[in-house]
Amino acid sequence: MTDTIPTTDTIPTTDTIIAFVDGSIYSHSVCQHAAWIAERTRAAVDLIHVLGPREGAAKADLSGSIRLGARTALMEELAGLDEQRAKLMAHRGRAILDDAVDAIRAAGVAAVTPHLRHGDIAETVGEQDLAAAMVLIGKRGETAEKPQRALGQNLERIVRASHKPVFVASRAFRPIVRVLVAWDGGPSAMRAVDFMARSPMFAGLEVRLVSIGPDTPEAKRSLADAAALLRAAGIEAETAILPGQPAAVLGRIEQEEGFDLLVMGAYGHSRLRTMIVGSTTSEMIRTCRAPVLLVR
């Protein structure tokens, strides 16, 4: 299978979801979520592994205090080691993609294509996601294997670079049955609900729309409009307006009531204005056990 993996920069422009795998403990969950979404939406899966700068790859110039002839020999040896390391990383990338393809096909999805890319992951997202319906990434990268560690350093950059919704997979996979939606009436929240209404991914799921803040007539009307949009698409949504701080309230509901997915706008408005991709959202994604779907 390794020999069939494309190494070019061209990714097919079909109705796809793009899933990034990096060999971390979250990669298997990314694959399982990608397969689950692909089965419900009948989309193909483009698997991408990006070969970029790795931790500890910085090169130190050790040649300054040695003779010219020895310096030349040393630089040639270092260049040879760099070339060997690049080949090993490419081989590792192909192995990661092989495993990911096997995992998705084992889940019953045949339309999966692996791609090995060179460059920056956020730039890759910005270049390739225009033809896709969604981008999938793991909550953390391969250097953050403990739940208490920081989120993957590329998460914010990927969300900002993406033109499409970004699905942030949690460590463990479970089929999505119950969906919690953070609603504030802002443009990104509206786009999130519109995406749900248009996507077969949410058909038949239990959905709750929650607004955090004062229980005003305007808030009720805004929430009712969002529910009506979903209802027109065949999705019945329970609604609630709750007091408190958005991150704390949504986090408590997700954990105590066992929701399988949190949907929210990537850029907030009103009481949720601080829930941009940054400290508040990062805290929610870090503490939330369920995956998070971010829509700009």
Image (tube, helix red, strand yellow):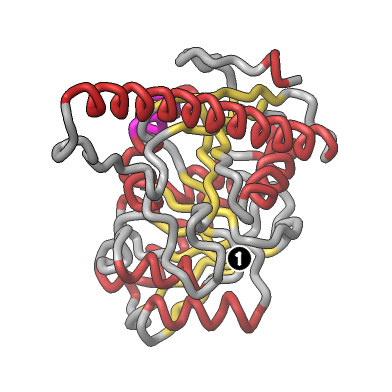
Q: Is residue 59 above or below residue 216?
A: above
Task: Please give left or right for residue 184 compared with residue 99 in the image.
Answer: left
Task: Please give left or right for residue 280 compared with residue 242 in the image.
Answer: left
Q: Is residue 126 magenta?
A: yes
Q: Quadrant of residue 83?
A: top left
Give the mark count: 1
Q: Which residue is mark 1?
A: 290
Task: Please give left or right for residue 269 compared with residue 116 in the image.
Answer: left
Range of magenta residues? 123-128
Q: Is residue 120 above or below residue 189?
A: above
- Mark 1, residues whose alpha carbon is within 10 Å: few (<14), some, or many (≥20)? many
Which residue is located at x 74 percent, y 52 percent?
Answer: 204
Q: Quadrant of residue 161?
A: top left
Toward the viewer: 101 or 253?
A: 101
Q: Position of residue 212 (x, y in %)?
A: 39, 77
Toward the viewer: 120 or 74?
A: 74
Where, quadrant-wise, is the N terminus in this rendering?
top right
Q: Residue furthest bottom?
A: 244
Which residue is located at x 47 percent, y 45 percent?
Answer: 166
Which residue is located at x 43 percent, y 82 percent?
Answer: 248
Q: Main secondary structure of the magenta part?
A: helix
Toward the viewer: 91 or 124?
A: 91
Q: Position of residue 109 (x, y in %)?
A: 79, 31
Q: Position of residue 287 (x, y in %)?
A: 50, 74
Q: Is residue 265 magenta?
A: no
Which residue is located at x 58 percent, y 41 percent?
Answer: 21
The amino acid type, in three-letter code, at marker 1 is Ala
Q: Position of residue 191 (x, y in %)?
A: 40, 46
Q: Quadrant of residue 23?
A: top right
Look at the numbered disc 1 and give the secondary structure of its residue. loop
Q: Is residue 125 above or below residue 34?
A: above
